[in-house]
Amino acid sequence: MTELAANPYDRNCPSRRLLDRIGDRWTVLIVGTLADGPMRFGQIARHVDGVSQKMLTQTLRALERDGLVKRTLYPEVPPRVEYELTEAGQTLRAPLRALEQWAMEHLPNVAVARTEYDHATDSPERSAVPA
């Protein structure tokens, strides 16, 4: 396999697609959910409030394709399928946990900044078109 020089600031860099995947809201929440161990589809859906069945399916398939999630089909009646993080997926736990912690810590400041920005953009000075 050839070594790729990664430059995520270059729009043609393959790392951008991976950054898109791991930076996606649903990926962050699903990886966080699977950090607790293997789960069935319905368990993940119940844990990740607001995710549609279609989006959960698409995200799990993409994570499986990227080697971050393993799907195991058990030969039972009815069939049972479980999803779990692979070794590579496990390595995402710490950075995503840090991102989640950062978001919770800074949420109040972000909310204030958004309110201030929204009020400022409503003002005539802010909405005026620059000359």
Image (tube, helix red, strand yellow):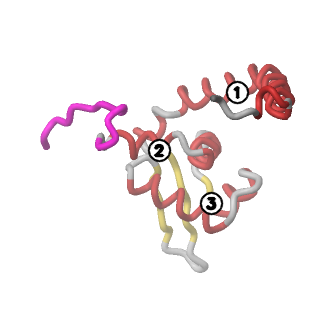
Q: Is residue 13 above or below residue 63?
A: above
Q: Which residue is mark 1?
A: 103
- Tag 2 or tag 1, which sits nearer the N-term? 2
Q: Which residues are magenta?
A: 1-12
Q: Residue at x 40, y 43 (%)?
A: 18
Q: CA distance from mark 3 to mark 1?
A: 28 Å
Q: Residue at x 61, y 62 (%)?
A: 55
The secondary structure type at the circle numbered 1 is: helix
- Residue 119: in magenta span: no
From the top left corner, tell me how far across and down residue 80 is, in percent. 57, 69
The part of the image, by quadrant, that contains residue 54 is bottom right
Q: Which residue is mark 3?
A: 40
Q: CA distance from mark 2 to mark 3?
A: 25 Å
Is label 3 in contact with label 1 (beta carbons under 8 Å)? Answer: no
Number of residues whose C-alpha sits closer than 10 Å to that of mark 2, classed few (under 14), some (14–19) or many (20 or more): few
* Main SS category, magenta section: loop
Residue type at tag 2: Asp
Looking at the rendered image, the quarter that the N terminus falls into is top left
Q: Which residue is mark 2?
A: 20
- Tag 1 or tag 3, which sits nearer the N-term? 3
- 70 left or right of 44? left
Number of residues whose C-alpha sits closer than 10 Å to that of mark 3, classed few (under 14), some (14–19) or many (20 or more): some
From the top left corner, tell me how far across and down residue 111 is, in percent. 82, 27
- Residue 11: in magenta span: yes
Q: Residue at x 70, y 27 (%)?
A: 103
From the top left corner, tell me how far across and down residue 22 is, in percent. 49, 41
The part of the image, by quadrant, that contains residue 70 is bottom left
Residue type at tag 1: Ala
Q: Nearer the viewer, mark 2 or mark 3?
A: 2
Residue furthest to the left in view is 2
